Image (tube, grey):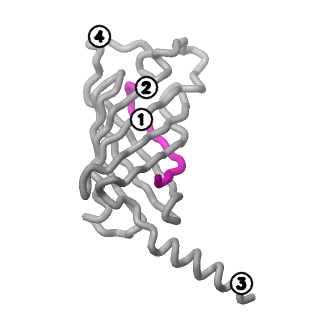
Amino acid sequence: MRKIVLALALIVTTAATAQVFTGKGDQKFQVGADFQSGSTGVQATYDYGIGENISFGLTAAYALGIDDDISANFDERAMLRLRFNANIGNVINVDPNLDIYPGLGFSNKNFGGHLGARYFFTDGFGIYTEFQVPFASYKTEVLTPSQEIYNQFTASIGMSFNF
């Protein structure tokens, strides 16, 4: 019984002291599923803190499940994005385990923005959700259905890890 109480106390203490974004030198890795009109896929992100509330990173995504009426090659299914985040969890101070991060991204598809949130249960593990929207596509003509992949509103959800 004593061991169970001690284990629960350690878990609660660890969860209570988890901090989502610690500033300069902080590193986050996230992996999850992304959803958009016409396809679903996988997404991985890496963010590196360069200041108290600023991080830069990289996103890689690939559309796996595509509607039958869309024919897309590898270039149209794959997306690579450089990203900038303003980590404002400590500014709004809702919960020390929660970080909200609006940001901008430059990808091989478009220039856009994102809004994400991470919640850490321990110092090393949490969950995230993120919404991305393009502000400007690099193609000026009307996009084909295959060119719309990662060139439209997308939502993702998955796991977040500290390095």
Disc 3 and disc 1 in contact, CB within 8 angstroms? no
Q: Residue 88: within the magenta?
A: no
Q: CA distance from mark 1 to mark 4?
A: 26 Å
- Mark 1, residue position: 59
Marks 4 and 2, how far apart in space? 20 Å
Comparing marks 1 and 4, which lies closer to the viewer? Answer: 1
| Marked residue nearer the N-terminal end (3 or 2) | 3
Report helix, strand or loop for mark 3: helix
Q: CA distance from mark 3 to mark 2?
A: 48 Å
Q: Which mark is residue 3?
A: 3
Identified by mark 4, the residue type is Glu
Q: Are marks 3 and 4 in contact (CB under 8 Å)?
A: no
**What amino acid type is highlighted by mark number 1?**
Thr
| SS type, badge 2 | strand
The x, y position of residue 64, in whole percent, is 58, 26
Which element carries disc 4, helix, strand or loop? Answer: loop
Amino acid type of the residue tagged 3 in the rendering: Lys
Which numbered dot is residue 141? 4
Viewer-closest of 95 and 16:
16
In the rendered view, would you say 85 is above or below 66?
A: below
N-terminal label among 3 and 1? 3
x, y percent for residue 26: 36, 54
